[in-house]
Amino acid sequence: MSRPIDPPSTPPAADIHTDTDAEAPTVPRGYDLVVIGASAGGIDALGVLLLALPARFAAAVMIVMHLPADSPSYLVPALAHRCALPLLEPDAGEPIVPGRVLVAPPGYHMLVEVDRTVALSTDAAVRFSRPSIDVLFESAAAVYRERLLAILLSGANDDGAFGLERVRAFGGTAWVQTPESAGSPEMPRAAIVRGAADAIYNPETLAAHLAALPTSP
């Protein structure tokens, strides 16, 4: 299994965009991978984001949602009808390709390997969670660098905040749900307090910006 490497440099303080910002970029930046982390209260926001993805979405998508390790996975069947892209729980070695949504299976950390395939791990829980958002964000940042967009949604702990710092350190982009719109505001608030957000949006604005990203021919 690949391990994240040190980022090239420490990024400058974020010039944070919000829902009321009239100066957001008019030309969307392209990404090869979008990673999304959610926990308590995040399922509804996740559904809003997936509903906005067009069928020709040009990036791959990977999702970590905190679930009990011994529970059957319900995310793929619960979310498939809201998304124009195919959703699946990947096996180890699954290629990360544009236009597909990969959902971490319960009880496994999901990581990005240097050859842009999926690794699954039963290593110890991180931030009391397996799968861990930090683990996905950090491994993806080291591989995709400036071609990575990371989105942190509602949750009741601080998982994902460190991972967003790593995303920004490698040149990627970090979006965070507004704590006011989150069912559990602790997770997005932890990222904001750490200065790890490039933008802070409610789910509807997050979805609109996702839908505006480049599509494939």
Image (cartoon, grey):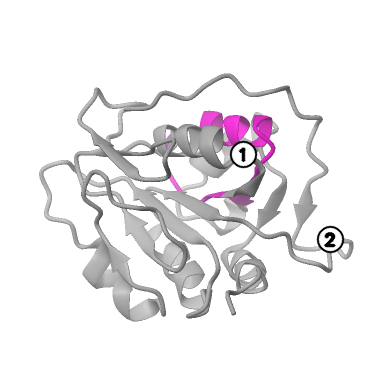
Compared across the picture, whether 180 is left or right of 80 comes to right
The circle on residue 5 is none
Q: Is residue 165 magenta?
A: yes
Percent of width and height locating residue 98: 47, 64
Label 1–label 2 contact, CB within 8 A: no
Residue range highlighted in magenta: 150-176
- Kindly indicate the quadrant of the structure image that contains residue 166: top right
| Residue pictured at 51% horizontal, 74% vertical | 53
| Residue pictured at 72% horizontal, 22% vertical | 9
* Secondary structure beneath label 2: loop
Mark 1 vs mark 2, foreground winner is: 1
Compared across the picture, whether 30 is left or right of 155 comes to right
Amino acid tagged 1: Arg
Percent of width and height locating residue 96: 40, 53
Earlier residue among tags 1 and 2:
2
- Kindly indicate the quadrant of the structure image that contains residue 142: top right
Foreground: 174 or 90?
90
- Quadrant housing the C terminus: bottom right
Amino acid tagged 2: Asp
Give the CA separation, mark 1 to mark 2: 26 Å
Q: How many C-alpha atoms fall within 10 Å of the one at disc 2: few (<14), some, or many (≥20)?
A: few
Foreground: 193 or 162?
162
| Residue pictured at 44% horizontal, 63% vertical | 46
Percent of width and height locating residue 79: 32, 71
Compared across the picture, whether 211 is left or right of 35 comes to right
- Quadrant housing the N terminus: top left
Which residue is most to the top? 6
In the picture of the structure, the residue carrying the numbered disc 2 is 21
- Give the answer, above or below, for where 179 lies relative to 30: above
